[in-house]
Image (cartoon, rainbow, N blue to C red):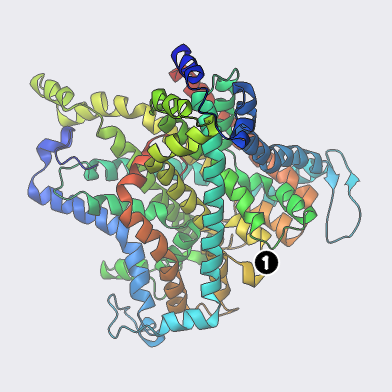
Amino acid sequence: MSQVTTSGPQSVLSGRPLRLIAAAILLVNGMFPALWILFTSLKTEAELTVKPITWLPHAPTVANYMQAFSDQPLHIFLFNSFMVALLSTCTTLLVSVLAAYALARLNLKYRGLILSAIIAVSTFPLVTLLVPLFEIMRALNLLNTWIALILPYTVLSLPVCTLMLVSFFEGIPRDLENAAMIDGCTRLGALFKVVVPLCAPGVFTAGILAFVNAWDEFLLALSFNSNPALRTLPVGIQLYQGEFAFPWPVISAALVVGIVPVAILIVIFQERVVSGLTAGGIKG
Amino acid sequence: MTTSTLNITDRMEKQPPAWSRLLDLSDKALAVLLLAPAGLLLSLIIVYPVLRLVYTSFFSLSLTSGLPAEFVGLENYQLMIEDPVFWETTWNTVLITLITVPGALVVGMALALLANLPFRRQWPVRLSLLIPWALPLSFAGLIFAWFFHSEYGVVNDVLARFGIEGVIWFNSPSLAFAAICLTIIWKTSSFMALIILAGLQTIPRSLYEAADVDGAGRVRQFFEITLPLLKPAIVVALIFRTITALQTFDIPFMMTGGGPGTSTATLAMYIHQNTVSFLDLGYGSALAVVMFALSMCVTVIYLRIIRTKE
């Protein structure tokens, strides 16, 4: 992505005006919905119901943000989303580092079969397991706990992270590990002291993808956690809708609050995220 | 390998601590140990639930009735075949897949071709493709519900500026369906564009230069160089997109709640309704088995393609 010169039949057509138009289309397509919700969140209810509608807020106000936090426990939704995403990311990384190391380094008899199984799981529709997972979580008394979400979210990102890490591990020369083992490291020690640090960028990228996956998930969070104190952000945002009223400025403010954390992550680590996303077949 | 074993014996005096010798396992034991956590998780969250799903689908199990589960054979499936809502939601799901998957491909391809122009700064382009990907589906559904709002929505406002009278999007089944499909295409095309863009950047420039020398036009170059070379990346992206399209839930749930009536409800929404709202686990399971079968078909095709590539 960082190349300035690009290939392709377009390069000849790339006059400055064309580039400007292209940039405008891309930016409007990518940013407009988020910007529009930002504008809406800064408008007063009165400005919102003026016709014809205004585009930029005339008298920007942060009152909607205050109300978003006071009408519903938005900070609790944020905290729940953050903890569930963080804990499931850590579990995913730990489990997939171990599995990927075995697949990349040990001469396994059924390596091909295991890899195929992982690919098959990566396309698995978790929605279909709503009933049995609901039953399992109910039987284990895990409904309305973070664990009810952390376990499925871990599995959601596990295949993709494992496949990604296998290819990263295969790029690390074996000699480095052997050297560590000669110096008295066990194999597991060598994995965590030598291989994982060398693969840190890859592990980190896998982590971001797992985090975003968990942050986005809606259906399971909606089905397994009915207790308001345990709702994650996408589920909590529904609570702003009254029976008849739909307070759009307040909902917009809550949406902006929910978009910002992931947006920051994306802005800082954009190159890494793109390389991770395009490294293999990954769900979008 | 032999040299390192020799070296280890050379340095026998430098013993690792006793606890870590316990962890010094044979390859086989180590493999089992390393794969065990993943295996356990997958058994608990995927394998056992799949078996349980099929099993439950043969039972009448409704948590509201308070009756114990009763084996009813294929009754749930029979009910399903006679259930018009099942057919409607399945058809909606298939239709959403058939519209939004090619739609996302076409829009994604266009975005990728635009993004591949030689911009001086890459980060705004990259961000404008990443933001829609990172936005939660449920958020996208809410944002676009606001876009398509009949009174104060920006879509009707733009239409009005062009002299077209705005419509009440969510009162008509076909318009509501169109709004949902547009939203899904917007949300998913960016990811498609990122995959295609990565593919575009691996195509050597020299191929186009050679085609220029041979006098091939832009359009011909696109169809004879760009498209064939992008095919592998596109196929993988399309299959993942197809499988996620079959699971469509968040966007219609947020935009229309399935309405008007059940005209925009998807199979995933019907499963959710039967399971979580009606607590009819037997029927919900039978519905889920159907969705499972649908997506398994796609997965099998996917594995075939991957195998032939190797």
Q: Residue B273: which quarter of the image?
A: bottom right
Quadrant housing the C terminus of chain B: top left
Residue drawn 55% across the image and 77% down it: A73
Q: Position of residue A196 (x, y in %)?
A: 44, 38
Residue A222 is left or right of residue A136, and the answer is left
Give the total number of marks visible in the rendering. 1
Q: Position of residue A88 (x, y in %)?
A: 56, 52
Q: Position of residue B306 (x, y in %)?
A: 48, 23
Residue B298 is left or right of residue A40, and the answer is right
Residue drawn 29% across the image and 39% down it: B197
- Is B16 in front, or is B301? B16
**Mark 1 burial class by Cα count in 10 Å: few <14, some 14-19, many 20+:** some
Residue drawn 38% across the image and 54% down it: B132
Q: Is residue A281 visible?
A: no
Q: Is residue B163 above or below residue B65?
A: below
Question: What amino acid is labelled 1 in the image?
Answer: Ser
Q: Position of residue A132 (x, y in %)?
A: 74, 47
Q: Is residue A106 above or below residue A89?
A: above
Q: Is residue A261 visible?
A: yes
Q: Which residue is mark 1?
A: A226
> Which chain's residue wears label 1?
A
Residue most extreme to the top: B2
Residue A56 is left or right of residue B99, and the answer is left
